[in-house]
Image (cartoon, rainbow, N blue to C red):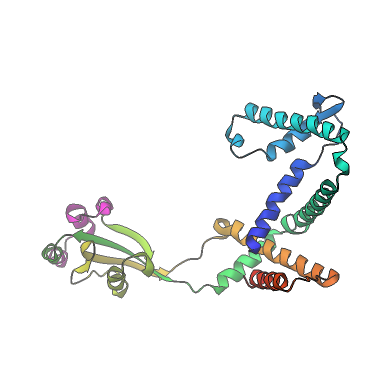
Amino acid sequence: MLKYKMLAAVALVAVMAAQTPATAQDAADPVIAKVGDAEIHKSELDLALTGLDPQLAQLPDEQKRAAALSGLIDVKLLAKDASKEGLQDDAAFKQRIAYLTERELHNAFFKKHVVDAVKPEEVKARYDAEIAKITPQEEVKARHILVKTEDEAKAIIKDLDAGKDFATLAKEKSTDPNKADGGDLGYFTKDRMVPEFSEAAFKLEKGKYTEAPVKTQFGFHVILLEDKRKQAPPPLAQVEQQVKQLVMRDKYIDLLTSAKKETGVDITDPALKKAYDDANKAETAN
């Protein structure tokens, strides 16, 4: 649940930015349109573009800019009329504005103290900690020759016993699509293959082939083991974003824990309190 809450918070940061009016008046932020006396600056258009509907985001750049500008103009036109009618003084409107203000303050704080606060060394340290928890799996590198009948497989084993090259025989006789690569399967862990195949492959010594055909749902195999090793962990560059999310999650939990201790949270509805407490326990346990 926290994962979704945190991702939603990140998304709301972008929405917050899109809703923040521009105030810069210098040459770098020119006025691009006017709605009555109200000015629309380039920075407003740029922010509106970040909150554009995903379907419109697929349009060419000029069409996207036009769509964003159209939305800005619509907002300013009707906002002006709404102000004339005094809708800003409506109790429900004020309540919504208060909620939106607090939500956007939450997002700004989240961005400052979580998103922007993550340091490369924190990501590296968390990566090292997660890798240390992993027990490396054994993996093997193998080739195979797949045929339809047991007799065909036995004949291939005789050819291998006579000194024929495995890859050459695979190209000539295998029915597997990888025959062009000499039956090369690359490296794989036990769970990547059907049980009968994995059991036979992992029992072999490096450089040895199966002395009897191995039957699976696909047919009969002759397997050559070329190498055994411990599976290497993924490099940091490959999983950096996932690890960063873990660091962000921890920072967010720490912020909330500290804030709850300082401010206190009292939920008067017993059922709602239980649901809230259960949800928060699940979040912190992940």
Q: How many marks?
A: 0
Depth order, front residue of 141/219:
219
Quarter assignment of residue 195: bottom left
| Picture residue at 83% right of the left edge, 31% below the top | 81
13 lies left or right of 207: right
| Picture residue at 82% right of the left edge, 25% below the top | 34
Query: Where the C terminus falls, by quadrant?
Result: bottom right
Q: Whole-percent x and y of residue 243?
A: 61, 61
> In this orientation, does residue 49 appear?
yes
The answer to if 154 sits in the magenta stretch is no
85 lies left or right of 211: right
Quarter assignment of residue 29: top right
| Picture residue at 66% right of the left edge, 63% below the top | 2
Quarter assignment of residue 1: bottom right
State whether residue 177 is above or below residue 254. above
Q: Main secondary structure of the magenta part?
A: helix
> In this orientation, does residue 165 appear?
no
Q: Whole-percent x and y of residue 7?
A: 65, 55
Depth order, front residue of 269/148:
269
- Magenta-highlighted residues: 157-181
Q: Whole-percent x and y of residue 141?
A: 34, 64
The answer to if 169 sits in the magenta stretch is yes
Q: Whole-percent x and y of residue 276?
A: 70, 69
Depth order, front residue of 208/67:
67
| Picture residue at 18% right of the left edge, 69% below the top | 213
State whether residue 121 is above or below residue 107. below
